[in-house]
Amino acid sequence: MKIFIPLFIITTLIITSVSCKKSTVNPASPTSPTTPAKPTSYDFSAVDKVLNDSVPVKFNGICYALIDINGQTAYSKSFGGYTGDTRELLASCSKWLSAGVLMSLVDEGKLKLSDTVGKYLPNFTKYHKGNITIAQLFSHTSGFPGQSDKNYEGNPLFTLSRAADSIAKNVPLLAAPGKQFYYGGVSMQVAGRICEVVSGESWAALFNEKIAAPLGMTNTDYGLSLNPGIAGGARSTPNDYIKYLNMIMNDGVAANGTRVLSQDAINAMEQGQTANVSVAYTPYPLSLLQTNNFYGIGNWRDVTGSGDTLIEDSSPGAFGSHPWIDRSRKVTGIIFTYLPNQGYVATIWTCLNVRSLVRGIVPQ
């Protein structure tokens, strides 16, 4: 088994290439709900110790840790008044949620990951950027930088349409599409606009319809801006976010039996997209990138096994929160906090330590 340790930047940010086979299963339709078995009682005292030692010093005393096994709560811990219903900005934890919206439209046949930007946004063809694929937009391999000099992707006075047009006209490509990994938010903003175009709906409406409502995520949204941060603008709670993680773990089916995403969509999200690119910028130290397939569609492929099989994936954010999935143990978890200054730097090693401890506590 290879284990890869992620670090994450203070901006909120994007994706790669591969097309997704349309599923024959109708997403958002009910299937037979199953009641997950209550998890075996495990000794999480080692996790307790790490959090008790770290949170007062590194998390400014505020944190809520939640770990599910097989869709059922196995561990929770509160610090500083944080609860499972505390809502905060997620930063790059948003990327995983946004990937779900994108893949729901793939399921419906409204777009393909292999489609190019120019097919839906002609301005990109006009400025010689029309051949970028949607998968490249969502895997940080579009050729765009992570952020634009004028912050088009984060301007609250823009619409998502205006942001995309400004990126097409004014943000230069740093590399040919599919050749370079540059972590950031610019290209995901473009992908979000494509989702609006093919659906005829706003991003806010899409997220609610495709993800939040079927999962009962009543405290999760992307704020009120007409230019929502696709890569980092969501806000949520631990109890809401774990519902999304459990749906992914359950291959696209919510706890109530509603199919939110197809199995094909889940497979495409988790497939490595960076096998043939160079690395221009990554929040990982280069010395720790021991695989070239370290990023999928909106999520980091943290732990892989033989044949590049995915074992764990995650989407930590700049404000210190850290969601992850361990497929080999049916574990989903989130360490939730809000530290607006250098949050990821303060919390990342504690979060990775907790994940490592859970591997030793819960058998495969």
Image: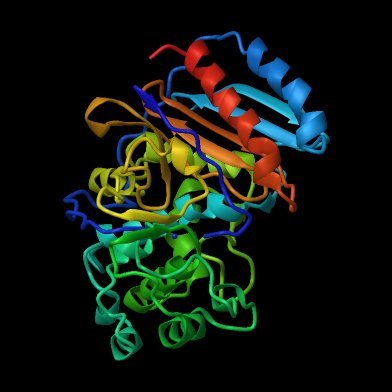
Task: Assign the N terminus to one quadrant of the image.
Answer: top left
Task: Assign the C terminus to one quadrant of the image.
Answer: top left
Q: Is residue 85 left or right of residue 244?
A: right
Toward the front, the furthest residue is 287
x and y percent of residue 109 in the render? Answer: 22, 64
Report the coloring of the rendering: rainbow
Q: Which of the 4 image quarters holds residue 139?
A: bottom left
Residue lying at 29% horizontally and 51% vertically, measured from the top left: 273
x and y percent of residue 263 in the render? Answer: 26, 43
Q: Nearer the viewer, residue 240 or 46?
A: 46
- 106 relative to 310, above or below: below
Q: Which of the 4 image quarters holds residue 15?
A: bottom left
Q: Which of the 4 image quarters holds residue 327?
A: top left
Q: Is residue 328 left or right of residue 158?
A: left
- 67 relative to 150, above or below: above
Residue lying at 37% horizontally and 43% vertically, measured from the top left: 294
Toward the bottom, the furthest residue is 126
Q: Nearer the viewer, residue 41 or 270?
A: 270
- 198 relative to 96, above or below: below
x and y percent of residue 130 in the render? Answer: 28, 80
Q: Is residue 242 left or right of residue 76?
A: left
Q: Is residue 203 visible?
A: yes
Residue lying at 47% horizontally and 47% vertically, measured from the top left: 215
- 2 relative to 301, above or below: above
Residue lying at 64% horizontally and 83% vertically, measured from the top left: 157
Q: Nearer the viewer, residue 319 or 197?
A: 319
